[in-house]
Amino acid sequence: FLDIKCRAAGLAPDAAVVVATVRALKMHGGVAKEDLAGENLTALRAGLPNLLRHVANLREVYGLPCAVAVNRFPTDTDAEIACVQSECERLGVRAVLSTVWAEGGKGGEALAREVVRLCEEERADFRFAYPDDAPLAEKLGAVVRRVYRGDGVTFTPAAQKQLERLEAMGFGRLPVCIAKTQYSFSDDPTKRGAPEHFTVTVRQVKLSAGAGFVVALTGDIMTMPGLPKSPAAERIDVDADGKITGLF
């Protein structure tokens, strides 16, 4: 959004919101998906560096004041919520509970007030992660080093040739979109939390001319969205009394 859409639309955001869940942070701390419902402060603290890196990126790389929206699940304990809020406060960022799914608009009022406060009281110094005139390979390297906090990027021989061809065709000034796993800052989905000292390997580079950016593919990522192996639809049912079950 920041490096692609804001460039194309001439937008300069006043603030940003990082959406987080206790469950996701515990997963980054090493908890298996089937065990996420139980309180686990040790795993939560181990996973929090992932959230804090996102916060740091927005503030240090993109120059934006930000808030953390904690989407609360029924299984989240007060101690876990307090832990997230405390760690965010140490960075000078407020972590605000969002219970919109349970309470509708009322559950988002606190978050809305914090966003308004950020826009009115904090000063944004929005900037991109890389300049327009940098070569495509340098743009990709900038994202890996500055945003993902890795050591750099490498290219397969095929990807290197594709980069050179796009540069020769005059598409070098386009922004880049990196297609990779959503489970890690790296291109390895098993490296959870806030990994360091890794290299991202680009296996293919392709042009999305109509959209106005260049896509770099890593790992075995698919660029078309799809359902998970076990979608929620498999657990939704209607009981004998006509009550819908399995929605949450």
Image (cartoon, rainbow, N blue to C red):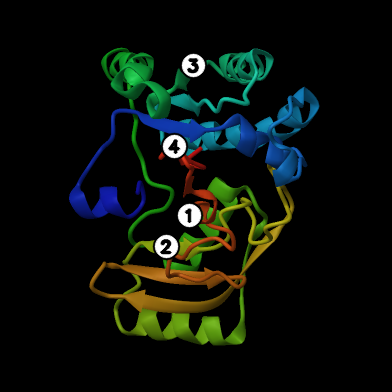
- Looking at the image, is mark 3 or mark 4 earlier in the sequence? 3
Disc 1 vs disc 3: which is toward the camera? 1
Marks 4 and 2, how far apart at CA: 49 Å
Do tag 4 and tag 2 residues touch (Cβ < 8 Å)? no
Marks 1 and 2, how far apart at CA: 31 Å
Q: Which residue does the numbered mark 1 point to in the structure image?
A: 233
* Crowd tier of the residue under label 3, counting other residues whose Cα lies within 10 Å: few below 14, some 14–19, many 20 or above: some
Disc 2 vs disc 3: which is toward the camera? 3
In the rendered structure, the answer to whether residue 107 lies left or right of residue 222 reads: left
Residue type at mark 4?
Answer: Asp
Q: Which residue does the numbered mark 3 point to in the structure image?
A: 94
* Crowd tier of the residue under label 4, counting other residues whose Cα lies within 10 Å: few below 14, some 14–19, many 20 or above: few
Image vertical order of residue 109 relative to residue 34, above or below: above
Residue type at mark 2?
Answer: Cys
Q: Which residue does the numbered mark 2 point to in the structure image?
A: 177
Residue type at mark 1?
Answer: Ala
Do tag 2 and tag 3 residues touch (Cβ < 8 Å)? no
User: Dot 4 lies on which element?
Assistant: loop
- Looking at the image, is mark 1 or mark 3 earlier in the sequence? 3
